[in-house]
Image (cartoon, rainbow, N blue to C red):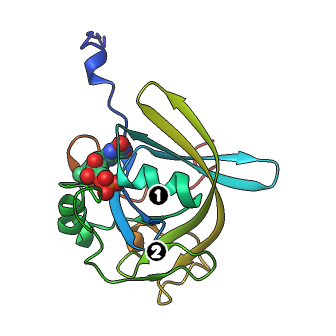
Amino acid sequence: MKTRKSIGREHSMCVQPSFIIGTYDENGVANFAPITWVSITWDKDRFLLVISMNGSKKTKENAETNKKLSANLVSTDMLELMDKLGSYSGSDVVKNEVLHEEGLTLKVPILMESKWVYECEVTKIVQMGDTHTYFCEVIDVTIDASIDISKGHDLFTLDPVIYSGNYYSIGKYLGKIGDFV
Ligand SMILES: Cc1cc2nc3c(=O)[nH]c(=O)nc-3n(C[C@H](O)[C@H](O)[C@H](O)COP(=O)(O)O)c2cc1C
């Protein structure tokens, strides 16, 4: 028989996808920061990314000023970049020395390295203490032109970094909805 044990709420980790959020400041200077408290929700006819950020951050400042951001999916070959961008703040030093361009649809900085990018408008901000959660309408998704999505969203091609306090990559293909009913 299986038994359980309590390990305490300090272990409230969540399995997280990894993104680098791109924003412009009021002078059009780009900034990039890793954020993994990211999920998605739906409202009538639109998808919204749900992005939570704690404390003071250049990314928060920029998102509130411009009401726009990009969410750049991090693949395993971008780990070093993500680690570096998370180690200091754009509030202290310009943090855009990475190949980036303007979004295809919105005026947001996007990482050319990222295979899958959401271009978003910030539509609602919810504050809980020192943490702000941004509901960001997905206006467009832009991808590496070499990726063929006609057969679905292949996670082996996107090769995302999964975060839990430690970094992981995805494992096996398990099937699709309905395969196990
Ligand atoms: C892997 C990783 C994941 C992170 N996820 C988050 C997050 O979900 N929310 C958050 O507030 N900070 C998160 N951070 C911390 C920010 O990236 C960090 O504070 C960064 O320096 C902010 O930069 P900025 O001030 O230029 O926006 C994460 C850092 C790393 C390395």
Name the residue located 28 percent from the left edge and 41 percent from the top edge: 164
Figure disc tally? 2
Specify whether residue 38 is in view.
yes
- Mark 2 vs 1, N-terminal side: 2
Q: Residues within 10 Å of mark 2 (few under 14, many from 20)?
A: few
Quadrant of the image for the C terminus? top right
Measured along the vertical axis of the image, is residue 164 above or below residue 67?
Answer: above
**SS class, disc 2:** loop
> Residue 160: x percent and y percent?
36, 62
The answer to whether any part of residue 161 appears in the image is: no
Q: Is mark 1 within 8 Å of ligand 1?
A: yes
Q: Amino acid at mark 1?
A: Asn
> What is the quadrant of the N terminus in the image?
top left
Residue 139 is situated, as x and y percent measured from the top left of the image, at 67, 67
CA gap between label 2 and label 1 equals 10 Å
Which residue does the image show at 19% across and 59% down from the upper left? 83
Residue placed most toward the observer, 122 or 11: 122
Tell me which amino acid carries mark 2.
Answer: Gly
Q: Position of residue 7 (x, y in %)?
A: 24, 14
Q: Quadrant of residue 27?
A: bottom left
Residue picked out by circle 2: 28
Image-quadrant location for residue 13: top left
Residue drawn at point x = 39 percent, y = 82 percent: 112
Q: Nearer the viewer, residue 104 or 127?
A: 127
Residue 142 vertical position relative to residue 155 in the rendered view, above or below? below
Question: What residue lies at 23% left-to-right and 57% top-to-bottom?
Answer: 92
Q: Which residue is mark 1?
A: 62
- In the rendered image, residue 28, in percent from the top left (x then y), is placed at 46, 74
